[in-house]
Image: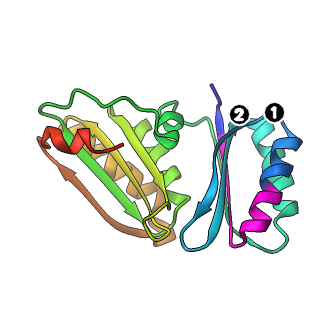
Amino acid sequence: MPLAIGILELSSIAAGYKAEDGMLKAADVKLLVARTICPGKFIVVIGGNVSAVQTALKAGEGLAAGFLVDQIFLPNVDPQLFPALTGSVEPPAAKGKALGIIETFSSSSIVRAGDAAAKAANVSLLRVHIAMAVGGKGFLLLSGDVGAANAAIKAGIEEIRDAGILVNHVVISNASQELFSDYI
């Protein structure tokens, strides 16, 4: 299981592919997400051990050719983050559970919020969505009892507070089962 996550967000799709290639060649990392994102940008998300991710990020930065929008390095991430990013979380048995949501203007900052939220309380991180088909925004979905969901959402918001990129957040107590069935 990867221990760190690295993200490069670029304003050029061509530079994004070039940076992705360089990152994968520079170190033994796992490609978690690499794709175009709204509005006309490219994002690369990698995972691996701390030093490999740092090496790959440095290589990607060097190849970004002035198109780097954002870079994030998160060492020692919560293990729930990986399946939530790649869409491989099984739908939970959510009867009586709360659904917590954070929405950001920045696509990559939602990963920082998700890691902080998952570490803060006993919740299940369901989805961390990066920019695809949401106008460049990011959002996360998590589940737990109401108190845990509130604590997790608070921690996620606190992690990104200074960046000024929070759009909205909500905790829905006793969320309907259909909301959980529809999250993937």
Q: State the residue position of label 2.
A: 48
Q: Measured from the top left, where is residue 151 in percent x and y?
A: 29, 44
Query: Do the residues bearing badges 1 and 2 touch, measured as CB atoms within 8 Å?
Result: yes
Q: Residues within 10 Å of mark 2 (few under 14, many from 20)?
A: many
Please tell me which residue lies in front, 94 or 149: 94
Decide whether residue 16 is among the magenta residues. Answer: yes
Q: Choose top left, top right, bottom left or bottom right for residue 62.
A: bottom right
Hey, which quadrant is residue 24 in on the image? Answer: top right
Vertical order, 98 against 169 (above or below):
above
Residue sitting at x 38%, y 49%:
155
Name the spot of residue 58 as percent of width and height, x first. 83, 53
Q: Position of residue 69 (x, y in %)?
A: 67, 70
- Label whose residue precedes the other's in the sequence (1 or 2): 1
Q: Which residue is mark 1?
A: 28
Q: Is residue 101 visible?
A: yes
Quadrant in the picture for residue 49: top right
* Amino acid type indicated by mark 2: Gly
